[in-house]
Image: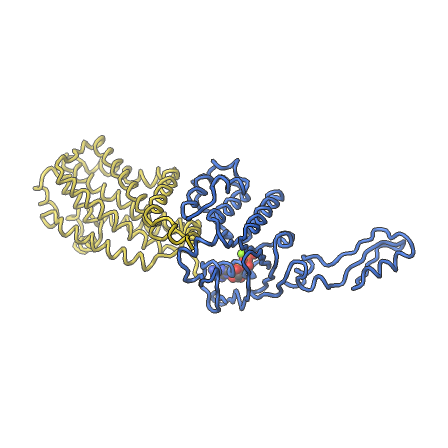
Chain colours: A yellow, B blue
Amino acid sequence: MTTVAALPGVLSLGLARGGTELREFFRQKENVVFTFSLPAVIMLLLGSVYVTEPIHGQMFAASMIGAGIISTSFVGLGISVAADREDGTLKRLRTTPMPLASYFIGKAIMVLVASLAEVALLLGVAILRFDVEVPTDPAKWLTFTWVFLLGVVSCSLLGMVVSSIARSTRSAPAVLNLPYIILQFISGVFITISALPGSLQTAGAIFPLRWVCQGFRSVFAFSDEYALQEVAGSWELGKAALILGVWSVVGLVLVTRTFRWHNERR
Amino acid sequence: MKAYENHQAVDGVDLDVARGEVFAVLGPNGAGKTTTVEILEGHRVRDGGEVHVLGQDPGKAPRTWRSRIGVVLQTANDAAELTVAESVRHYAKYYADPRDPDEVVDLVGLTDKAKARVRTLSGGQRRRLDVALGIIGRPELVFLDEPTTGFDPEARRQFWALIRELADEGTTILLTTHYLDEAEALADRVAVLAKGKIVAEGTPQTLGGRAHADARIRWADPNGPRELFTSEPTKVVAELARHGELAGLTVTRPSLEDVYLELIA
Ligand SMILES: Nc1ncnc2c1ncn2[C@@H]1O[C@H](COP(=O)(O)OP(=O)(O)OP(=O)(O)O)[C@@H](O)[C@H]1O
Ligand SMILES: [Mg+2]
């Protein structure tokens, strides 16, 4: 058989899937309007209460950007994989010689583009409405980049794991949004961490969102003196990298264990 | 063999389909057709028994094996936001030597709808797209699970022509259907599945002893319609005709449908 050598490569198929994923994503108007704009709406509402001084705007915007990329990765990807399982996309893909890795590459492309767009939207709102200043130091942007990537990767993987628990697309948004809202509550997005009881602080410190937000605050703070306002009195970037890295590995292992092509038991 | 919870869905189905053959599986709702076909496609895990498809066990078959089969599933609602042309073109990319996407769209009669979003297609049009995606990779073996459900009569004839064309190219075809005329028109051999078991297998012409069954002769005489069954219809008609012209004379063998209904009863 000559077909062995001639089948297209994993990466080129992954890119083809990414293109198709993005096309489908941006054509789903409700999805784009609601899932996408929700963090911006929350930012506008809460910000009008919280932001009384410029530094509040900087810190709040940083936390909301963290929450925004968790929404596009954890919630967004989780729902989209559940939908692929429900509407037969995965089942059909399984009838083709497409390798599963290409499917994941396609999803990764979709999540990265969606998350970048979310960051752009939130930054835009923050600048226009709360006069947030964007850092100019390249070192800050380097921090931003790795926090962004580790945050998106770990939460994408966890979103896929949780979506495997959801029985159907109808239940997926509920199953994914509940932990997402709780995490925003205990990770310093809605309420500063120091205002939380100790047990909730500890709980929040286990999960990625807290560290993504803290990392972004280090990027958007006017100076490193503001680290003193964090519970530990420092940005703890090393710890953030470690925890996000561990979650990425745990997520990857769990995804390979829990991934299902079908909804029904077979 | 396959059981769901407490239900034995497929029990000892023994099938051999030769290369280049068109094989139809008939059977009432819930007979186990989809279960059987999906086991052959590698979609469902069998509980027992041996399966070889293109020389491989579908449960463990590699990517190259998938590139040699084409599948039309019984239901699908995917790719809603893509256009017909986009989805056919996209699926073509998965294969080493795909058919030309535009040609395939034309083959299934969707050229007018090539730029329409899949979500806007009618049931029958959606089904035609499924067929297009099933054959885009130039498969050696095609599984079609009730491919013509929802087709209008003309589309069904077009589909038959397409299947014959594929068969002429040497493609092996395994299809399930509820339309007996379809099985009769297309299949070299048919099997009837009922309650998870094969109750008959053969060519459409001989299924269930159809070729040897008694012929039914009907005609009308002054007392009203008459009917009789005989294994020697020629002789009987010659006998009857001695008295002159017979009004409304018909001689019929049991149709595939008659045989089928008998088999699944
Ligand atoms: N995932 C499943 N879980 C439990 N039972 C199932 C499952 N899939 C099928 N069954 C049962 O197995 C039996 C055979 O189903 P199958 O889908 O194979 O029938 P079919 O011949 O394809 O019917 P139809 O003509 O309606 O498509 C049915 O009684 C069905 O209820
Ligand atoms: Mg079926």
Considering only vertical position in the picture, is B249 above or below B106?
A: below
Residue B9 in view (yes/no): yes
Q: Percent from the top left, x then y, of residue B88? A: 45, 43
Residue at the extreme left of the image, as rendered: A225
**Considering only vertical position in the picture, is A170 above or below B260?**
above
User: Considering depth in this image, is A169 or B87 the residue closer to the camera?
Assistant: B87
Against A99, residue B39 (above or below) is below
Q: Residue furthest front?
A: A2
Q: Position of residue B229 (x, y in %)?
A: 79, 62
Residue A210 located left or right of residue B231: left
Q: Nearer the viewer, residue B30 or A182?
A: B30
Q: Is residue A123 left or right of residue B80?
A: left
Which quadrant of the rendered structure holds the C terminus of chain A?
bottom left
Residue A4's spot in the image, x, y percent? Answer: 39, 54
Q: Residue furthest right?
A: B243
Total numbered badges shown on the rendered structure: 0
Which image quadrant for residue B180? bottom right
B165 and A201: which one is in front? B165
Identify the image quadrant of residue A20.
top left
Where residue A56 appears, as percent x and y from the top left, is 16, 38
Asked if residue B39 can be seen in this view, the reply is: no
Q: Is residue B3 left or right of residue B252?
A: left
Up-down: is B78 above or below A137? below
Q: Which residue lies at the image location 88% right of the left edge and 58% below the top edge?
A: B240
Q: Is residue A37 left or right of residue B3?
A: left
At 44% from the left and 42% from the top, the residue drawn is: B87
Q: Quadrant of the N terminus of chain A?
A: bottom left
